[in-house]
Each structure stands twice: as C-alpha cells, then as structure tokens.
Image: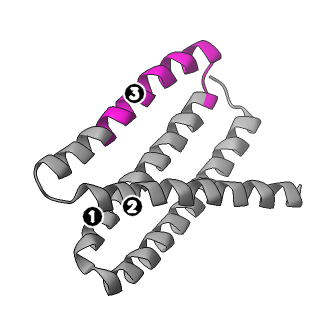
C-alpha cells in the first residue's frame, strides 16, 4: 500500500480523537470515583476497573476501525469480522475472571463499564458537533 495523504490525515485525526477521548475518560472516571468515595468506598475499585475495561474497549474499537479504514474492503471485512468477536470475548473473559474469582462485585464493574461507554458516546457526539461547526 502506497503513501496516501488522505489516509495520513485520517490517521492523525483519529489519533487526536482517541487521545482526547482518553483524557475525557480518565477525567470522568476520577470525578465519579471521587464522588463515590463519599458514599461507599468499597465500590470504587470495581467501578474504576469496569470504567478502565470500558475505556480500553472503546480505544480498541477505534483502533480496529482505524486499521479497517486503511485496508481494502475485502481485507477490512475479514479483519473486522475476526477482531470484533475477539475483542468481545476478551472483555467478557476479563469480567468473568473478576466476578468468578470474587475480586470485584459485578454491579460496580457493570456501572463503570456502562458509564465509560456513555462518556465515550457523549464525547464523540460533542467532537462531531465541534467538527461540524468548525467546517
């Protein structure tokens, strides 16, 4: 695959979005965990672990999409159909490991995971609106 200026621009944009999203996720996790300390500090580790798993899951999803866009359609289809189930299985296995071993309660894990996804979706909507206003 040769040099493609459009792909390089897309790569820089997606890396910028991923890094900004990571910053927002870290900030949101810290803020919510700080608030949870006042209510029940025993749920903070589970919440933080779930949030971290969710944030890494979103980052991995963006990485898969970024790589898929750079490939030919046939190759991208095969890559994505293999990468998504692997990502899902690893996240599910990590959740199962934490829960089965009794390391963390399932509800704080699920709450953190869910909030990280909600944070990512809201942040991406904000970035899209920001981009449309600047265009």
Task: Specify which label sits upstream in the sequence, 1 or 2.
Answer: 1
User: Could you say which is closer to the camera, residue 19 or residue 88?
Assistant: 88
Callouts 3 and 2 close, C-beta under 8 Å? no
**Part of the protein shown in magenta:** 69-91
From mark 1 to mark 2, how far is it between C-alphas? 8 Å
Find out whether residue 2 is within the magenta segment. Answer: no
User: Split into 4 quadrants, where in the image is the N terminus?
Assistant: top right
| Pointers 1 and 2 in contact (C-beta within 8 Å) | yes
Q: Earlier in the sequence, mark 1 or mark 3?
A: 1
Q: What residue would you read off at disc 3?
A: 85
Of the pair 39 and 65, the residue shown nearer to us? 39
Circle 3: is it few (<14), some (14-19), or many (20+) Cα within 10 Å?
Answer: few
Label of residue 46 in the image: 1
Tag nearer the camera, 3 or 2: 2
Residue to which mark 2 is pinned: 112
Q: Is residue 22 left or right of residue 44?
A: right
Quadrant of res 60 = top left
Q: CA distance from mark 3 to mark 2?
A: 21 Å
- Is 87 on the left or on the right of 119, as rendered? left
């Amino acid at each position: 695959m040769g040099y493609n200026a459009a792909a390089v621009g897309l790569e820089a944009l997606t890396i910028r979005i991923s890094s900004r999203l990571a910053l927002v996720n870290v900030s949101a996790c810290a803020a919510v965990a700080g608030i949870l300390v006042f209510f029940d500090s025993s749920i903070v580790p589970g919440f933080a672990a779930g949030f971290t798993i969710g944030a890494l899951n979103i980052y991995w999803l963006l990485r898969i999409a970024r790589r898929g866009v750079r490939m030919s359609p046939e190759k991208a289809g095969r890559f994505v159909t293999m990468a998504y189930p692997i990502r899902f299985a690893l996240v599910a296995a990590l959740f199962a490991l934490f829960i089965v071993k009794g390391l963390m309660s399932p509800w704080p894990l699920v709450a953190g995971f869910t909030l990280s996804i909600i944070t990512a979706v809201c942040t991406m909507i904000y970035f899209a609106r920001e981009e449309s206003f600047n265009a």
